[in-house]
Image (tube, rainbow, N blue to C red):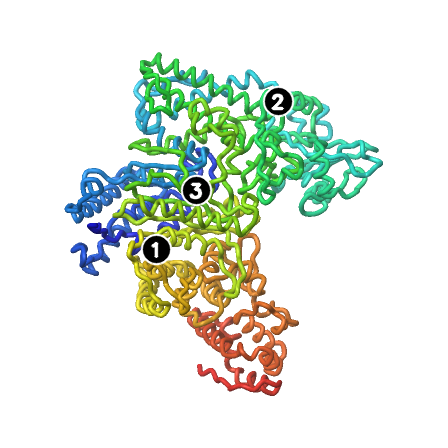
Amino acid sequence: MTPIKTPKKLIEVALPLDAINQAAAREKSIRHGHPSTLHLWWARRPLAAARAVIFAQMVNDPGYERHLGRGVNKQQAAAERERLFKLIEDLVQWENTNNEQVLAAAREEIWKSWRETCAINKNHPQAAELFNPDRLPAFHDPFAGGGALPLEAQRLGLESYASDLNPVAVTINKAMIEIPPRFAGRAPVGPRPAGERQTPLHEDWSGAKGLAEDVRRYGAWMREQAQRRIGHLYPPVTITPELAHGRPDLQPLVGQTLTVIAWLWARTVQSPNPAFSHVAVPLASTFVLSSKPGKEAYVEPVVEGDTYRFTVQVAGNPGFDKAAYARAKSGTKLARGANFECLLSKTPIDGDYIKAEGRAGRMGARLMAIVAEGPRGRIYLPPLPEHEEIARKAQPEWRPETALPDDPRNFWTIGYGLTKYGDLFTPRQLVALTTFSDLVAEAIERCRQDALAAGIPDDGRGLDAGGSGATAYAQAVGVYLGIALSRLTDICNALCRWEASKTQVRNLFGRQAIPMLWDFAENNVFAAAAGDYGTSLGNMVRALLELPAKGLAHALQADAQSQNISINKVISTDPPYYDNIGYADLSDFFYVWLRRVLRPIFPGLFATLAVPKAEELVATPYRHGSKEAAERFFLEGMTRALANVACQAHPAFPVTIYYAFKQSETEDEAGTASTGWETFLEAVIRAGFAITGTWPMRTELGNRMIGSGTNALASSIVLVCRKRAADAPTVSRREFIRELNATLPEALEAMTRGGVHSPVAPVDLSQAIIGPGMAIFSQYAAVLEADGTPMRVKTALQLINRYLAEDDFDADTQFCLHWFEQHGWSAGKYGEADVLARAKGTAVDALAQAGVAQAAKGSVRLVKWREYPADWSPEHDARTPVWEALHQLIRALNDGGETDAGRLLARMPDRAEPIRALAYRLYTLCERQGWAEEARAYNELVTAWSGIEQAAAEAGVVGSQTILDL
């Protein structure tokens, strides 16, 4: 078999990592026009990172490769890389997302490298098939998800294929990459919304502008029709003298009719107190309506015998009381979770009682307040009986009956009797959403008729059949109208909270779960604010306008384990993350609505009642019966999927794989390890890949959904992989270590010498060094231990990490040493800590348990020696890192002098030498950093070491005395 000549790609040698990370971090704060606003997806990669990775994956590194007879000398290669880095730095800027000059330069570099690769392989027997210099290879992402990678491949000029098992993901990808190019350059066919001025005759309808304009026009028609049909369910409020009584803020508004923004409800259960068991009492986590300084407002319950009513108090009015406002913050809640008190009797209401009431169908809701839009901002009003009555009269003709998954970790409502997706909406919300969904079909037919009238022929084929005539165009418009409806459900459900600090309704998916909410906000879908169909549609249209809308692209439903789409394509992918979120379960929330609207357009894609789940590659114990079975399922399935990619991917290019996860731990004889990371690397290597690089990238939003109230990753690792040779040999552990000794020092020096060639931040160094280390490990069929068994990935990682010069300290101490070098005693981001801990073979939770670190609200800091407990017992501490032992010794020295320190050292004599070595390391580190105060503590221990050892010997330990020479 003739070997293929494969030049090294830029991503296998160097990247301007800082520039990419800065652009990715900045991009996360951009909303308007960003593709992520087309429709929610839970873990998109930033466009900047995706664009840079694909570019560097396709462009040849300029370095000299003797065996290929290509490249330039070191000095010239360095200058050429600098030029390519500058191009990447321009390419990743948000402002250049659609900058044709920058994109054209990037495309030209891709073509230049491709032609060079084709020339090198022109005599290969498969050259006609694999190396056509006039046709770039196509791109494929087999785990397409939110579609950032296929979108950026399309932007870089590649024919792009996106596939996913999840129909919601496929729909998003169709809307982003497949549909816009098919109808690019067309003028809109729909009539302008009534009252809009006619614009000039000659307009620019390039790209997706005409399509986006029709989506806007037919969406406006839908909103108008919906308001005619169900507007009576969303009444305005008139400020009467009665409402304004005792409310100076309302008196100037008497007689005015205001638009309601939201109705605020509290769920209710019957009081558990027998004296009030006939009363439905509120479960309110808070009564605060506004916490804005100077504009504070709260709901005040007024108890009258065995009844109660709600009033509203606003800052500046006579009834406003600061103490009552402070009490209002906790509503009727007693403690965290489902723990409340009866408003009438103060009897505690625990979670078990609430669950029983909910399951029995006795959980209700009561209106607490109405929020209206005034001339100068929000107006807070008490509940009006007529408004509550109108809401209760809503009778939906359809509701989604799909059951929620039995996954209590991520779906909390089931325990309270809300077991179907239809239970997550109020009757009024169901009426609104079904009305809009019915109108999509009507809008499609209107658009088809208008397209025919505009002269677009009808070829009789729909969108799914590849049509491009009037029917297909109308259906294309309908896809976006349906997506806008699905998008609306995220903020039009009974699990949306009222955010008092911003005085607005917040969407359900503030995290990757469906939590239980006790008091919720029901928005007005006609309020011209967040939660209005028109607002939702407008945000989506802005994103549509920014899409490339050029080149061929295909979005398909396929299982990554069995698909054959990847054949001879460039692969970059973002697979599921071990035991994190089951997106198939979460997607059902949207799928039930998308299916109702889009099934006539995509009958195959929406054939099933729910999103397919059995094949989804996440280690979810609730699906597989146990954690062990879930891990086995993930490893076997991911191995099959990656092996499928390895054997199909175009042989001239490496495959790039993103990976990030919330770390979970396992304990074994070797200590604590990161199960997800090791399991995934195991799958990559078993699949037949050799790893040629690892790049840490800041691809997660700092306040992203799963991170709300939890510690979660702020980075992804991009693995660069090539197919391992079929005849790869095995080597011994000794030979593996010998290769590490020969390779890693030079690699480490290259990563840390500074300048444009080595922008690896110190916090990322532990992860980046895995690249060259695992490149050695994974090129072999196996590395054999002394007993002949294959070396585990975990062992290989531990050996690789020794080359960061942490001496032979334990994993926890290695983490602390690196973290201290970067942050001192200050707090740093949890995501960075998690990346570092994972690379060291430990975990942030384990470090906290050991007592050397504290983690809270997304940040991590090391514990100072002054904070260590004085009653610490090394004999009974199951986890005693050298770091902890050292700082306990410093505490003892400061509290009781050399005698106390010696007594403590006598209780852990085997730690003496590591403690001494670490003290020296930290002293020199602090001196180098100019941290005089920190250096003093270590210097005092160093200078007192002789006396401490003597005191230890007198306490009963005999050992050699060690002197530190500074």
Per the image, the residue denoted by label 2 is 236
Amino acid on which the number 1 mark rests in the picture: Ile
Amino acid on which the number 2 mark rests in the picture: Pro
Q: Is label 2 in contact with label 3 (beta carbons under 8 Å)?
A: no
Q: In this rendering, which labeled residue sits more in front, label 1 or label 2?
A: 1
Give the mark, 2 or 3, whose residue is nearer the N terminus.
3
What residue sits 72% from the left and 39% below the top?
354
What residue sits 37% from the left and 23% below the top?
463
Circle 2 packing at 10 Å, graded few (<14), some (14-19), many (20+), is some
- Cα separation between marks 2 and 3: 39 Å
Residue 503 position (above or below residue 580): above
Amino acid on which the number 3 mark rests in the picture: Arg
Per the image, the residue denoted by label 3 is 44
**Percent position of residue 706, x then y:** 53, 46
Q: Secondary structure at mark 1?
A: strand
Residue 67 position (above or below residue 146): below
